[in-house]
Image (cartoon, helix red, strand yellow):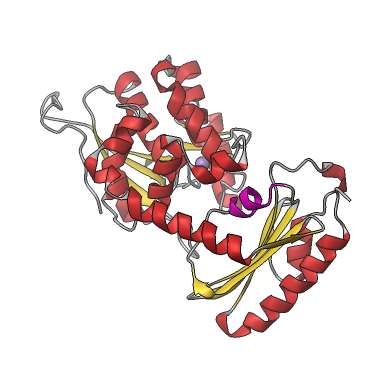
């Protein structure tokens, strides 16, 4: 459990009582951290100027997502994460299509929408690209929150969460401070890091956040690893008939920037990668977000992955095989590569 009151020394008390707000956010996610920060500033400016804030990251996992005993704040807010029907949760903002884990959760939220007091505290809209921009919209339109000073943060939350990068270079070279912060946030193993970072995101420009010594010191080894991944994929990838293939299963690379293949082969439409981690061999099946191909002529990648027990979206999918079935992964990858090369939409 993490307790990081923002400014306990300055928190004035009314009748000896200071409101304790616990903010639960999507962990290791740029939008999750930005949402928690934006919620804090919104709450302080529009709801209670004297509250203290604590931050607690949430991760997707099998089984129960929430530990009821963690909802110990006077107010408990969940941002950029699934719905909880717990009566202790007082605020909720999410934009994920799959926000409700169960039918009961969905019914609970529907009932909440019928109660004006509840409906003013819990908000859901899957049409928003980021939870940060959704929260800003609700704060501005329903509470008079001034989001002007946060325009840059909101812009980058949409850019990162929606992967709306203007080019492979923007996605892979990561020149913008927001991109470097994303790299750090997604790789941190220190449970105290993001709670320390969150308040800063709405207090100073992102470039200044990145210059804080406790942030800046984390960057060089991550950029080095990123550079190694680029070099490795460059030496292993082959583009033919619009499809890239690479096999890096002999190297333990726990995740790499998924836009690297299109950075190296910008003319390609599809990319198939074979990679390995401690617990699986993975076939990644993706498409180039910047392709000039006619979307009508493109193959639904989720359907292909489902044939092998995997899944995903129309434009990106994956199949996981247990470590002892790496041969099957190799066969599946070869079959998919052959199929996609025979259906080159730019041919
Ligand atoms: Mn999000």
- Residue 256's place in the image compared with 267, above or below, is below
Image coords of residue 223 (percent x, y): 41, 51
Q: How many marks?
A: 0
Q: Is 216 above or below relative to 199?
A: below
Please give left or right for residue 199 compared with residue 250 in the image: left
Q: Is residue 117 visible?
A: no
* Above-or-below relation of 314 to 74: below
Magenta segment = 259-266
Q: Residue at x 29, y 43 (%)?
A: 216
- The answer to which quarter of the image holds residue 69 is bottom left
Q: Is residue 264 magenta?
A: yes
Residue 87 in percent (x, y) is at 40, 43
Q: Is residue 291 rendered to the left or right of residue 341?
A: left
Q: Position of residue 71 (x, y in %)?
A: 32, 48
* Magenta segment, prevailing SS (helix, strand or loop): helix
State the residue in front, 107 or 339: 339
Residue 147 seen in this snapshot: yes
- Nearer to us in this view, 32 or 238: 238
Percent of width and height locating residue 322:
58, 79
Q: Is residue 77 left or right of residue 214?
A: right
Residue pictured at 15% horizontal, 30% vertical: 17
Nearest the camera: 51 or 154? 154
Determine which quarter of the picture holds residue 25.
top left
**Residue 21, magenta (yes or no):** no
Q: Nearer the viewer, residue 196 or 164?
A: 164
Q: At 61% across and 51% down in the image, what residue appears?
A: 103
Lateral position of residue 111 relative to residue 132, left or right: right
Quadrant where the N terminus sits is bottom left
Q: Which of the 4 quarters of the picture holds residue 77?
A: top left
* Residue drawn at point x = 31 percent, y = 52 percent: 70
């Amino acid at each position: 459990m993490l307790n990081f009151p923002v400014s306990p020394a300055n928190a004035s008390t009314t009748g000896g009582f200071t409101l304790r707000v616990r903010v639960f956010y999507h962990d290791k996610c740029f939008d999750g951290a930005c949402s928690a920060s934006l919620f804090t500033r919104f709450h302080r400016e529009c709801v209670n100027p004297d509250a203290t804030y604590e931050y607690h990251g949430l991760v997707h996992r099998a089984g129960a997502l929430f530990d009821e005993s963690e909802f110990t704040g006077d107010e408990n807010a969940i941002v950029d994460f699934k719905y909880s029907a717990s009566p202790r949760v007082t605020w909720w903002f999410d934009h994920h299509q799959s926000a409700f884990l169960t039918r009961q959760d969905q019914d609970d939220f529907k009932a909440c929408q019928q109660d004006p007091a509840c409906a003013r505290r819990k908000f859901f809209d899957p049409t928003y690209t980021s939870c940060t921009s959704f929260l800003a919209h609700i704060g501005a339109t329903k509470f008079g929150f001034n989001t002007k000073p946060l325009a840059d943060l909101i812009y980058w939350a949409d850019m990162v969460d929606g992967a709306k990068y203007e080019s492979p270079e923007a996605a892979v070279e990561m020149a913008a401070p927001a991109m470097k912060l994303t790299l750090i946030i997604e790789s941190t193993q220190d449970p105290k890091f993001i709670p320390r970072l969150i308040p800063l995101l709405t207090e100073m420009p992102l470039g200044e956040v990145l210059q804080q010594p406790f942030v800046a010191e984390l960057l060089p080894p991550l950029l080095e690893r990123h550079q190694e991944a680029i070099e490795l994929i460059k030496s292993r990838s082959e583009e033919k008939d619009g499809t890239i293939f690479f096999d890096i299963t002999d190297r333990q690379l726990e995740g790499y920037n998924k836009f690297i293949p299109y950075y190296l082969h910008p003319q390609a439409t599809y990319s198939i990668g074979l990679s390995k981690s401690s617990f699986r061999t993975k076939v990644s099946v993706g498409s180039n977000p910047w392709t000039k191909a006619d979307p009508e002529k493109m193959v639904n990648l989720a359907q292909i992955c489902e044939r092998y027990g995997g899944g995903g979206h129309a434009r990106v999918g994956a199949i996981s095989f247990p470590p002892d079935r790496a041969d099957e992964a190799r066969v599946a990858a070869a079959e998919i590569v052959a199929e996609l090369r025979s259906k080159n939409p730019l041919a």
